[in-house]
Image: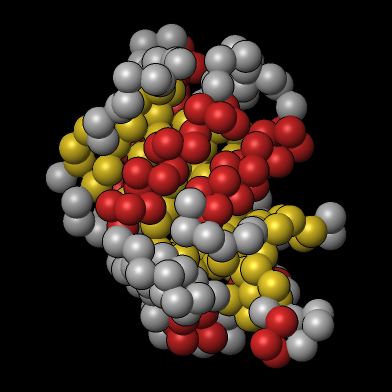
Amino acid sequence: MVKPLPLPDTSTQNVEWRVADAPVPYETAVAEMEARVAAIADGTAPELVWLLEHPALYTAGTSADDADLIDPKRFPVFKTGRGGQYTYHGPGQRVAYVMLDLKRRKPDVRAYVQDLEAWLIATLARFDVTGETRADRVGVWVRRPERGLTAEDKIAAIGVRLRKWVTFHGVSLNVDPDLDHFSGIVPCGIAQHGVTSLADLGRKATMADVDAALRETFDSVFGAR
């Protein structure tokens, strides 16, 4: 089931928000995204942010290296047209599929990815977590000084695709997933750093808390252009 997520009165644009109240199979999500992207491109549907969880699975982006799939039998593996390498999705992780028309906004893919990173960083700040970006890798990272001066973990991943300048796929934020599930892959092809979550960092946040923070910070980054 998919239900609308209430919008605050301060919304500056006609973006529909939905939240799934049960895990959505990956192939179902891709099919629904592709249909919605086509409708947005045709001007017959509004832009959409879809918040959901998936059953435990791995996805392989267009740059995935087979050597990074360490345990191919652990969970189902889906090849996908989004950018990036291998990633994990599963319960306790908030996935936000973002379908925006960049022709009506800013037709710049690099700027769009930077906006997604800024959105995640603003969301994490609501939970007193300092998220950071790195020039040589996509995603949002958290320093772990208790393990050393250069230690850091990934807390959020980004993988996007565009069709007729309409975006789909999006971001995943680790709220309270089983972090051991990431051990079946080299997440995003980066072996020298680990993964973390809000729960791992000692932040007690429900999925509803995270959804509210994502919604509240969205317009500050993706406001009317």
| Number of numbered discs on residues | 0
Q: Quadrant of residue 187?
A: bottom right
The residue lying furthest to the top in this view is 43
What colour scheme governs how the chains and residues are painted in the rendered image of this protein? secondary structure
> Quick check: 14 left or right of 169?
left
Is 117 situated above or below 111?
below
Residue 174's place in the image compared with 103, above or below, is below
Q: Is residue 154 visible?
A: yes
The percent position of residue 30, horizontal first and vertical second, equals 40, 45
Quadrant where the N terminus is found in the figure: top left
Quarter of the figure that contains the C terminus: top right
* Outermost front residue: 128
The residue at the point 47 percent across, 58 percent down is 127
Judging depth in this view, the residue of 209 and 49 nearest the camera is 209
- What is the x, y in percent for residue 170? 52, 45
Relative placement, left or right, of 50 versus 67 is left
Residue at (31, 57) in percent of width and height: 207
Residue at position x 65%, y 37% from top? 115
Taking depth in this image into account, of 175 and 39 the one nearest to the observer is 175
Q: Residue furthest right?
A: 135
Query: Measured from the top left, where is residue 177 in percent x and y?
Result: 39, 74
Residue 219 is situated, as x and y percent measured from the top left of the image, at: 51, 27
Q: Quadrant of residue 62?
A: bottom right
